[in-house]
Image: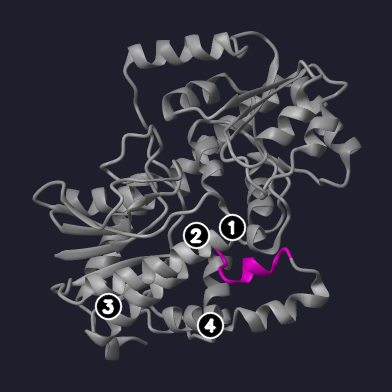
Amino acid sequence: MRVWILQTGEPLQIDNNGLRPMRAINLSNALIDQGHHVTLWSSDFDHFKKQHRFGTEKTIEVSNQLTIHLIKSRGYKSHIGVGRLIDHVQLGWNLKKMLKHEAVPDVSFIGYPPIEPAYVMSNWLRKKQIPYMVDVKDAWPQILLRGLPKGMRWLGRVALTPYFFAMKKIFKNALSISSITDLYLSWCNKSANRKPSKFDRVTPLTVQKQTFAKEEILVAEKLLGELGVIDDSRFKLTFIGTLNSAFDFSPVIQAIKNLDIQLVIAGDGPQFGELKNQSKNNKNIILLGWIDTVVANVLMSKSSLMLAPLKDLDDFRMSMPNKFFDAMQNAKPILTSISGYTGNFLKHHNIGIEYSSEDVENLEKILETMANDPNLVLKMGNKAREVYETFFDFKDVYGNLVDDLENLALTKYHDNV
């Protein structure tokens, strides 16, 4: 079976950046393991390094079963801004030109967003009568209205009319929509006024357990020790991720002021400078900057509780980000500020705690309780790993996704019910 995957903004097999594999690599590897040929379409611009891989359109034959097409675009300096929007328009335009002479696949998997290349790819596939599954991980273009005052959002929606039109067409023409939770899947269908399909599915952002050589682990141990993260009895509250505007660390920083808790923040991004200023007089806070997957794995093993201080926004309430799967897989309980799907899931399974960013006093009590009860932390952590193995096992999730694509490849548009 010949499968196309369109997925920009993620690590690729050709990269050597120490980043953890995401949907593009995970799915393509799972398909290859089952004997299929994969053509992976992505951007020449590396979203994480903020630099071009080659600076031009390029096709790379990685193996007999994997071909990577890189689409040229201008790139951008910031996650948020006009530059990124222009980049995505260019991706769509250049993808359209690249598709003119391509032989059709048997089935396609389209990562969404960005909207522009997804729209171009979905239109091309629809005209060729090739079934596709669209994989929705963010509520674009709805999230673009976040920064506007509520009274002005109607105007923003009018300005974004082309994006909403494209989103609806992508979803409606898909024989299958895959999304990260059932709430997100419902949002997709409701937003596009689309009837659910028998091929729709939930595909969590589960992660594969990585193994590392003993030498790599020793180097990571040494590095963390030099940065102040050592094996001691102190309670360690840890965040690992990109430091962008989705997170609010202020309530947590306030809550640990009077507690013997070490807050370890690993990552880089727009918030790094602000966090550095907030923590410069607090010896309980360690900012590690960017770390690779080996160091992240060792850091998590030393941690007591994982932190996900996400802003309690509508789209986050529907979601379960990948850092939750990291924590569960590594038997660590989770402290988070988002309610909705994830907050309810943590409470139901007793594998973490939801807090309110508006109630610092209660957050302090929560942290004090956890720090003084290691048995509770251990119990919740063990339960978290059990939940992961039951609901989110990597082989099961991606094995089922491959099966669905195989079935979809045998389906024609008029068979959709």
Q: Position of residue 54 (x, y in %)?
A: 28, 47
Q: Which residue is mark 4?
A: 162
**Cα separation between marks 2 and 1:** 7 Å
**Cα separation between marks 1 and 3:** 26 Å
Give the crowd class for mark 4: few <14, some 14-19, many >=20 residues within 10 Å: few
**Cα separation between marks 3 and 2:** 20 Å
Of 203 and 381, nearer the camera is: 203
For mark 1, give the secondary structure: loop
Mark earlier in primary sequence (3, 2): 3
Q: Which residue is mark 1?
A: 319
Examine the rendering and report whether any part of residue 342 can be seen.
yes
Mark earlier in primary sequence (1, 4): 4
Q: Residue 131 has which mark?
A: 3
Asked if residue 405 lies in the magenta stretch, the reply is no
Quadrant where the C terminus is found in the figure: bottom left
Residue 212 to residue 112: above or below: above
Contact, CB < 8 Å: mark 2 with mark 1? yes
- Residue that sits furthest to the bottom in the current view: 414
Q: Which residue is mark 2?
A: 180
Of labels 2 and 4, the one closer to you = 4
**Tag 3: residue type?**
Pro
* Main secondary structure along the magenta-highlighted residues: loop
Give the crowd class for mark 1: few <14, some 14-19, many >=20 residues within 10 Å: many
**Cα separation between marks 4 and 3:** 24 Å
Examine the rendering and report whether any part of residue 177 can be seen.
no
For mark 3, give the secondary structure: loop
For mark 4, give the secondary structure: helix
Residue at the image position 88 percent from the left and 21 percent from the top = 258
**Tag 2: residue type?**
Ile
Apparent side of residue 331 relative to residue 11 in the rendered image (left or right): right
The residues colored magenta run 138-147
